[in-house]
Amino acid sequence: MRLWCVFLALCCFSSPVVAQEPPKKPDVVEEISNNPFRATLLKAADSAAKKGEIRRLDVVRLRVATLSPAFLERAQELAVIQMSFSGDDLGEIPVDADGKIEVSRIDWEGLIAFLERLLPLILRLIDLFAFNGGSIYHDVA
């Protein structure tokens, strides 16, 4: 009974404890939803599905896959590599002084037709992620 009274006294008469808010971490969901590459890629997929070039199921698979930051990063890397070696006239591709493509400055909206043509490779990347448990790289023993 004494323990209960001490507990009650501490709870009732002690000063209120203000919980400190933990430092905010970047919201991954917000980061993904605001990704311009993802938005344009999904527009390209919708457009290709309307034309009958890919199935609606492929659009759904792509929407789900692009929720993964790892997949989204690999898909964007694939797009940048294909863009640099395609030989297509894709307009002005931003490069730095060393000649490297500045991914953050790419106007993905202007490359929607290019991304439509790239969809079969990106859909294949989904299969590779599923097969390899999330990694397209193999560990060599």
Image (cartoon, rainbow, N blue to C red):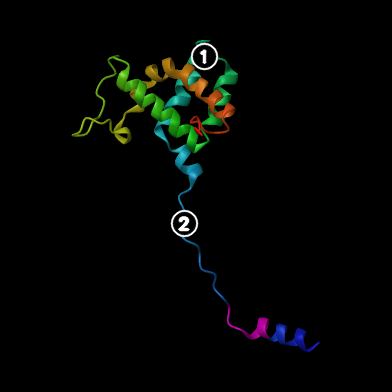
Nearer the observer, 44 or 124 = 124
Query: Could you tell me if the residues under marks 1 and 2 are in contact, i.e. CB atoms within 8 Å?
Result: no
The residue sitting at the top extreme is 52
10 vs 71: above or below: below
Query: Circle 2 sits on which residue?
Result: 24
Magenta segment includes 113? no
Q: Residue at x 61, y 84 (%)?
A: 14
Disc ID at residue 50? 1
Judged left or right of residue 62, residue 89 is left
Q: Residue at x 45, y 50 (%)?
A: 26
Q: Nearer the viewer, mark 1 or mark 2?
A: 2
Q: Residues within 10 Å of mark 2 (few under 14, many from 20)?
A: few
Q: Amino acid at mark 2?
A: Lys
Judged left or right of residue 97, residue 3 is right
x and y percent of residue 97 in the render? 18, 34
Q: Secondary structure at mark 1?
A: helix
x and y percent of residue 98 in the render? 20, 33
Question: Residue 39: in sight, yes or no?
Answer: no
Q: Residue at x 35, y 26 (%)?
A: 80
Q: Residues within 10 Å of mark 1 (few under 14, many from 20)?
A: few
Q: Which image quadrant: the N terminus?
A: bottom right
2 vs 115: above or below: below
Which badge, 1 or 2, comes first in the chain's sequence?
Answer: 2
The residue sitting at the right extreme is 1
Judged left or right of residue 134, residue 24 is left
Q: Amino acid at mark 1?
A: Lys
Marks 1 and 2 sit apart, C-alpha to C-alpha, by 41 Å
Magenta span: 10-16
Magenta segment includes 11? yes
Question: Residue 124: in sight, yes or no?
Answer: yes
